[in-house]
Image: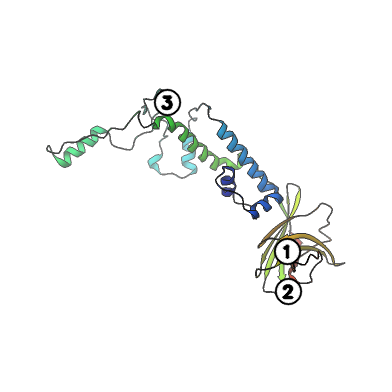
């Protein structure tokens, strides 16, 4: 199982740290480590682009975003296409106003007059133009929003993903003294063979994953399994057509590298 893209993004942004299991996974998984590196490069470029000049998006960009996200007709108008200027700050004087969905001051006064009569004076609410600083940070906020939407829509085109081809699969059956089940999948990821093992069994003790030659009973240890899922790289010199049986064993913590003889589940890989 690969790491969640959202968690990788939070790590790249420095919002959270990797735990031990995630570090172990990244040390073995080229796909996840490559995606984390790509996100980190994007974050570095984004944080360095403080002096980038913002330009208005091309015509039709908002319509494409509106269609892709299935937004309401209330926001069908391009928010950057309004004819008026909302800001008096010279640094953003060339940015079009966002069309207002609020009534104008005149309309607000008229509605208040209708409901309260002559004796109820109306104090119009004026939108501030310079004191709040909104005009200065709005362009960056709008740019961040735009980048976020575009990244979500076309992110798969910007970040190439690893090519994964499933080669074989196995259903892992329990031995008589175990209430367990499992599965194994052999795949080639960017030219590297990886075996992903899933195990559903009572917890406790050490679990080791093996490849077995059913003809000679020869054993190859792939390593210890941490938790219910394990991902193991298969060296190029290993002939998986020969070592075609996947075995998960319960091992004592006695320093003996050999198989304990206590297998939990076992199954043979079959080509897909």
Cα–Cα span, label 3 and label 1: 62 Å
Location of mark 1 (residue) = 170
The mark nearer the N terminus, 2 or 3, is 3
- At label 1, counting other C-alpha atoms closer than 10 Å, the crowd grade (few under 14, some 14-19, many 20 or more) is many
Location of mark 3 (residue) = 92
Q: Is mark 3 on a helix, strand or loop?
A: helix
Q: Is residue 180 above or below residue 63?
A: below
Cα–Cα span, label 2 and label 3: 72 Å
| Residue 185 place in picture, x, y as percent | 71, 59
- Picture residue at 17% right of the left edge, 39% below the top: 114
Q: In which quarter of the image is residue 241?
A: bottom right
- Picture residue at 17% right of the left edge, 37% below the top: 113
Indicate the quadrant containing the C terminus: top left, top right, bottom left or bottom right: bottom right
| Residue 72 place in picture, x, y as percent | 41, 44
- Contact check, label 2 and label 1, Cβ < 8 Å: no
Q: Residue furthest front?
A: 254
On residue 175, the disc is 2
- At label 3, counting other C-alpha atoms closer than 10 Å, the crowd grade (few under 14, some 14-19, many 20 or more) is some
Cα–Cα span, label 2 and label 1: 15 Å
């Amino acid at each position: 199982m690969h790491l969640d893209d959202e968690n990788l993004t939070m790590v790249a942004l420095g919002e959270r740290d990797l735990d031990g299991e995630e570090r172990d996974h990244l040390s073995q998984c080229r796909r996840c480590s490559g995606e984390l590196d790509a996100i980190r490069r994007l974050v570095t470029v984004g944080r360095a682009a403080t002096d980038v000049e913002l330009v208005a998006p091309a015509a039709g960009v908002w319509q494409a975003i509106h269609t892709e996200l299935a937004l309401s007709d209330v926001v069908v108008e391009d928010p950057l296409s309004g004819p008026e200027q909302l800001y008096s700050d010279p640094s953003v004087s060339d940015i079009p106003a966002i069309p207002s969905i609020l009534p104008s001051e005149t309309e607000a006064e008229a509605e208040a007059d209708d409901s309260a009569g002559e004796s109820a004076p109306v104090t119009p609410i004026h939108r501030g133009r310079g004191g709040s600083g909104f005009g200065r940070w709005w362009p960056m906020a709008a740019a961040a929003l735009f980048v976020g939407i575009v990244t979500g829509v076309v992110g798969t085109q910007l970040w190439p993903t690893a090519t994964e081809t499933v080669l074989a699969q196995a259903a892992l059956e329990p031995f008589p003294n175990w209430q367990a089940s499992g599965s194994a999948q052999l795949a080639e990821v960017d030219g590297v063979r990886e075996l992903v093992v899933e195990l559903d069994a009572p917890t406790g003790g050490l679990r080791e994953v093996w490849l077995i030659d059913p003809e000679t009973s020869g054993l190859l240890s792939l390593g210890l399994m941490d938790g219910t899922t394990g991902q193991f790289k298969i060296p190029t010199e290993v002939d998986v057509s020969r070592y075609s049986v996947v075995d998960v064993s319960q091992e004592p913590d006695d320093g003996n590298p050999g198989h304990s003889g206590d297998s939990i589940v076992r199954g043979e890989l079959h080509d897909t």
